[in-house]
Each structure stands twice: as structure tokens, then as C-alpha cells.
Amino acid sequence: MSLALTISLLAVLGFGAMLWLTGIGATALALLHETQAGVAAMTDRELDDDAKERAVRRAGLRLIGGAAGLAWRIALALGAAAAPILLADWLGLARLDTVLALMLRWDYILLVSLVAMGLGAGLRRVRGNRARDAKATGAAARYSAADRMVHNLAFSSPVVLRAAGWIEDRAVRAPEPGDAEAPILVTSLARGGTTALLAALHDVPGVATHLYRDMPFLTAPVLWNRLSGGQRRRVTRRQRAHGDGLEIDLETPEAFEEVLWQMHWPDKFGDSGITLFDTADRDPRAEAALRHHMARIVCARRLQGAPATRYCSKNNASISRLPFLAEAFPDARLVILLRQPVAHAASLLRQHRNFLDQQTRDPFVRRYMQDIGHFEFGHIHKPLLFPGMRSRAKDPGSPDYWLAYWIAAFRYVADHAETCQIVLQDDLRAAPGATMARLCAALDLNPGQTRFEGRFHSTADRADATPFDPGLRREAETLYARLAIRALA
């Protein structure tokens, strides 16, 4: 028996070694990427039918080649496994049927599998230690090939997300209308501090937000959470793609509400920019769907164990919809973050350059941001078309473009300031506890023992003003002072 065991282990080692030597892992991964590329092409709404056909044809040919590559590698591995068994039988050292009977025993299969998994985990850990720092803000922050396939399918058409929500309402439990009362809507231009404020409000008892766990089937958060593994599904906490030091995992709140706005008001999203909403854009059915989605998120958080009662979103595009939101959702609480203009514009420019690079290196970053409605930066940048934007600076690569954008946005805010609660980012930096206590009181929230000090930068918000036009700086600073007087005190 000991000789048969030795022969069997040699066969297992031969099988594994041949798979490793022939690079079957890379081949299988390439095959998965080709499958994902074909699915992405079929579901890409920016491609015409001819382009889709060409892309799918190319992917299909590569799949055939990849499958052949897998086949000969597996054949070689099986040959390497069979060689010691057949040789031992021919030499009379161990009978073939004895070795095969041993290898088919459940305890043998279990033990060998556990040892193989342990060795594999050890090897991955050694390799991972060398690559972890390089991946922290890069490739590891992006989806795997399988994740990308699921994402592309979920966002292939609004029909898919609508159907997912319809199924959830009937398979789990439709939310109650009262679950969407008095929603809290946080907005500003991107880089205004809305992510940090959303995270702080997420810590307050009773507040329900979107989570990364909800992706990609945002309209069916409860059902998708159950189908994808529930609380057992984990990812390593890591820096988000913005490279700003903020770390994320599946429980991190994020801005996904814009998906609903794109779904129900697609005509507002043009090639040159996103047009503003006004009261003339009211649509009772779309508004009811958005209200229902708010209730669904509250219901989802409650069913997942949180004491949720109030929906809270961060949606930077909502800064262009103030009169619409005030009329369509009169019970909503609108919160606008106000940041020093030069520092804000400098941060916008940095992120634009960051995402130009990321979207060039990885086309899926571009696809992902388009699908979730984040058109703020990079090659897909679409400005919110505030009055005066078309006559301002045209080049998003210039500092003055972003300062002019800030002026146009916050001049619009000043015209509608009575509909919202303005919060200074400087106050959140200097006195986070006191500022958040005042904000929670204004929002009818009870923060309890929640501590907010770690949620905001504590350093002063400064940036080099020299790249910006002096006239624009003065205009922006005057507007900032005018709005700061109306801020939460």
C-alpha cells in the first residue's frame, strides 16, 4: 500500500507540475477575458450593430483558439499523471487497479485536496506580499474578469435593472411607502467633500445608504445580496480609484443614485453635457419609481440588520436639480457642501487627469463610470450645463475651466439657496463634532454617541492659486463669501 501511495502522489505531482509548466492558469484567465470582451461588446450601447458583430467575431475566434490551448494542456497533464502509474504497473511495482482504487477513495481525495489548497494559498501569499503595495490603488481596485461580465450584463439595458427590481418586490418583500419619507440628499460638485459627509451620515443610527455590496444589481439590493453570498461575501479593504486615501469595502456607502436618473430621464444626458432639471421636467411615474427605490434601499438595510428609517444619498449631479427636487420631493432635506473655490478647482483638475490616465489604461474604468452616471472626469467628462458654462473656458485640461465651472455651479446654488442647507467644508475640518451635531439637528437625526472626528481631513484646505486667472479667483471668492453667510451656523 505504501508503494501504491507513493506512485499515486507522483501522479498527482506530475499532473500539477504539467499544468503549471504549460501555463494553464494564464490561458484560462485569457479565455475568461475573451469571454468578458465578447459580452462587453454585445452589451455596449455606444457600439453600432456592425461594430458589435466584428468585436464578437474576433472574440469568438479567440475563444476557439483558447479552448484548443486548454485542451492540449489538460491532455499533457493527464499524460504526466498516467506515466508513473503505467510505468509502475509495467514494472510490477504496483498494480494499476490498486493505485486507481486508492486515488478514488474519498479520504484520499479530501486529504490531497486540502494539501494542494494549502500549498496554493502559501504560494499566493508569497506572491501577494510582493505585489500588494503596487495593487493597492490600481488593478486590485478594479473588478475581476468574472465581476466585469456580471456588471456588463446588469447594465446591458435598463430593462435588466427594471426587471431585477420587479422580481425583488415579489420574491422578497416590497418596501412600504413610509420607508421613503424625508430623504436626505447630499450634493455638491465632485471633490466637494460629499463622500466624507456621506460616510459620516452613514454612521448615524437610522440612516440608510447605497453600499458597494449593492453593485451591480442596484435595483434589487436584497435579492442580489442573497444570491451573491450575503454577509459571507467579502473583499479586502483598499483605497478607491481616486487615490485620495479613502478606503472602501463592501460595506462602504457610495453614490449610485444617478443610475436611476439615467434610467428614467435618459434625454437629459447629451453628448456635450447634462442639462439642468427644472419643474417643467416633472414626471409622476419616474418620480414614483425614484421614491420607491429610496424605500427599497431603506428596506434592504433593515433586512440586513441595520435600524434603517431614512434614505440618504450622495449624488453630485443633484446640484443641478435644486428647484426640481424641492417640488418633486418636498419632504427631502437637501444638503450642499461648499468648499474653498481654488482648492476645489485644483482638486477637480487633479482627478480629471487621474481618470484620463485610468480610462486610457483600462477601458472598463470608462465603462463602469458611464454606467453609474459618474461623468465628472476623464474621457467621458460631461459638465452639468449651468447657465454660462457654454461661454466659459472650453478645455477641461486647464485650471481655469474648473474654476469657471465652480463659479457657474455655485451661482446657480446661490439662486436657489432657500431650498437647501449649506455646510462649509472648512467647518467640518475645523470642528467636525460640533458641525455634524448642528447638521444632524437640522436634519432631525439623533447621532447618539457617534463620533465624527476621523471622517474629515483636519488640515486647512489650501491650494496654489497661481495657475488660475486672477479675475476668476476674485469672482469665485466673492461668490464663496456670499454663500458662506448662509451656511449652517
Image (tube, rainbow, N blue to C red):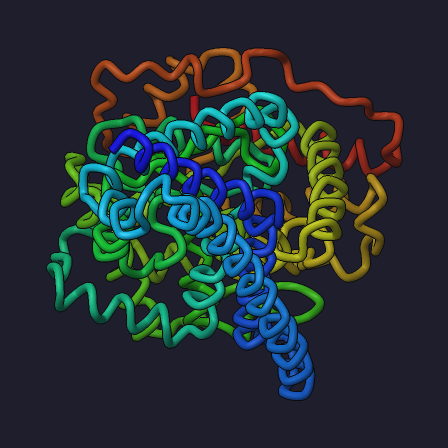
Q: What residue is drawn where x is 37% and y is 39%?
A: 93
Q: Image height check: is 266 above or below 452?
A: below
Residue 51 locus on image (x, y percent): 69, 82
Q: With 304 as the anchor, is 317 left or right in this view?
A: right
Q: Residue 211 is drawn in which quadrant?
A: top left
Instruction: Look at the image and tell me in which quarter the N terminus lies.
Output: top left
Q: Residue furthest front?
A: 92
Q: Position of residue 447 (x, y in %)?
A: 25, 22
Q: Is 119 or 223 nearer to us in this picture?
A: 119
Residue at x 82%, y 38% (from the top left corner)? 472
Residue 119 visible in the shown view: yes
In the image, residue 85 lies at what x, y percent? 40, 47
In the displayed structure, does residue 391 sit left or right of residue 122?
Answer: right
Please tell me how many numbered marks the rendered image carries: 0
Residue located at (27% from left, 59% from top): 220
Q: Quadrant of the C terminus?
A: top left
Q: Quadrant of residue 189?
A: top right
Of 389 and 164, the residue lying toward us: 164
363 left or right of 474? left
Residue 295 visible in the snapshot: no
Q: Position of residue 478 (x, y in %)?
A: 71, 32
User: Which residue is rendered at x = 65% and y = 28% of the image?
Assistant: 134
**Which sits in the foreground, 449 or 355?**
355
